[in-house]
Image: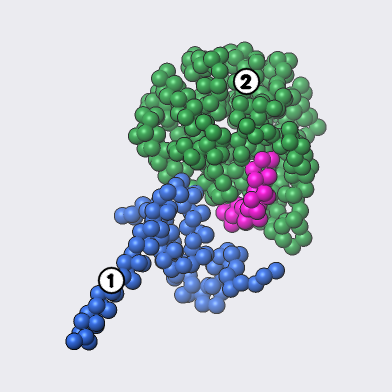
Amino acid sequence: MSKTYYDSGDLRKFGEITTWSEELGNKFFDYYGKVFEEGALTAREKSLIALAVAHTEQCPYCIDAYTKDGLQRGITKEQMMEAIHVGAAIKSGATLVHGVQMMNKVNKLEM
Amino acid sequence: MKKSLQARNNDLANTSRQLEILSNGIFAGDGLPTFADKIRETNQFPLRPKKLEILQINLGYMCNQVCAHCHVDAGPDRKEIMTIETMQQCIEVIKKTDAHTLDLTGGAPEMNPNFRWFVEEASKAGIKDFIVRSNLTIIRANKKYYDLPEFFKKHNIHVVSSMPHWTRGKTDKQRGNGVFDKSIKALQMLNDVGYGIEGSNLKLDLVYNPSGAFLPGDQMALQNDFKKALNNDFNIVFHNLFAITNLPISRFLDYLIASENYEEYMHSLIDAYNPSAVENVMCTNTISISWDGWLYDCDFNQMLNLKVNTNIKHISEYNEELLQNRNIIINQHCYGCTAGAGSSCQGVVA
C-alpha cells in the first residue's frame, strides 16, 4: 500500500488533538462550532465560504468535509463550483495585484 | 431502464449476503462497534416496542421506476403483489388495531390491481391518518392513473411523495430520466385538487433522501429551500418535508460497495450516532406487513427478510398484544435510523 503524507482517515481523528493540549483544543472546537452556527450569515452561506477557503488553503481534509457538508445541505454542484471560483479569483487577484508593486519597483529602478 | 438486483441475479438480491456484509468486514472482531454494542452503552438493548401507532402495509414490489437507492429493489420486473385475500386479512386487522395511522407503501402501491378497493375498504375502518406513499410519476404513467389525485381527495388520503431535490439533474440521476418533469406535473395536479395548500386538510408531504453517499442535512433548512424553489419555479406548494437517511441495504448497499463508499458511509453513520434518536425509531411504534402477509419490525427488516421475533409471524395469526412483547431485531443497517436527528418514514425523530 502506498504511503502518503495525507490520510483521509485522519479527518475523523481531528478531535484527538485535544488529548495533548486539552484546554487549547477545546477552546478551538468551541470557537469552531460557534462560528458555523446560524448568525447574520446562514449556515449554508458559511458552508460555501468554508468550501472556497478550503480550496485556497488547499486543505484536502477541509475540501472533503465541506463538499460533503454542502451536499447534505442540498447545495448544488454549480453553486459549489462558483464558490471555488470566488476563492480562485481572489487568490489570482492577490497574485496579480502584486504586479503593481513590481511595476513600481521597475519604474523606480529604470532610468 | 435499469433492472432490479433480482432480475440481474446480483449477489445482493440475496438478503443473507447483505446481512453477511453488514455483520462482518469492518464490524468483525475489534472493528467498528455493532449497533447492539452502541445501544448497550445506554441500556437500550434489547430494543423494545412502545405503543403501536402505525401499520405500514407494503402492497407489492412492482414499481414504474427503478431508483438507484431503492431499499425495496422495486421495479417493473418485480411481480410480488399483495392478493385480495391478504388484503382482506389486513382489513380485519385494521378494524381492530389500536394504531392510529395506516401507511401504504410499495413499490408503487397504486399499481396493485386491487389498490382502490383496498383504500375504499380500509377507509371505512375509521383510521385517523391514512397515508399513501406515492412516487408521483405513477400519476402520469398511464391515463388510468390520471384521476388518482381526485381518488386520494375523495378518501382524504394523506399523500407522502418522494422528491430528492428541487433540481432536474439531481432528481433524474437518482430516480431516472424524465422523473423530475413528471413529478412536477403530478405535484401540480395534486395542488389543483387542493392538496398541499396551507390550512388544507388534504395533506401533501414530500420525502427527501440524499442522492449519494452522504447524510441528509437539517430537515427544516431543506424544507425551506424546497418550498422556496418549488414555489418560485413551478408554483408548487406542500406541507412538510421529511428528510430520510438512506439505509445501507439492497440497491443502496450495492451502490455504496460499487462506488467504494461503503466503509466511509458506515463511519459517517456511526460518527453521527445519536442515542436520543434510538428512543423514537420507527420500529418502536410500527408494524410492517409485507405483500405476502409476513410481519416485520420495519420496512427495512422486511427487505432483509428479518421477520418479527415472536411465535406469530403472519397477518393470518395477528396478535397485537403478543407483538408488543417482542424484542426488535437489529443489525448494522439500524445506524441509518439513529444518525443525527434520526430518520424514519415520518422524517427526523430526535
The disc numbered 2 marks a residue on which chain? Answer: B
Residue range (magenta): B250-279
**B79 within the magenta span:** no
Callout 2 crowding tier (Cα within 10 Å): few <14, some 14–19, many ≥20: many
Point 68% across, 44% down: residue: B254
Identity, as a three-letter code, of the amino acid under mark 2 = Met
Name of the residue lying farthest toward the front: A111
Q: Identify the colour of chain B in the image.
A: green
Is residue B163 at all visible to an observer of this figure?
yes
Determine whether B13 is above or below B156 in the image: below
| Residue B323 x, y percent position in the rendering | 72, 32
Does the image show residue B220? no
Can residue B268 be found in the magenta stretch?
Answer: yes
Which chain is represented by blue in the image?
A
Q: Mark 1 points at which residue?
A: A97
- Residue at the image position 60 percent from the left and 68 percent from the top: A7
- Residue B148 percent location from the top left of the image: 52, 17
Q: Which amino acid does label 1 sit on?
A: Val
Q: Residue at x 61, y 39 (%)?
A: B68
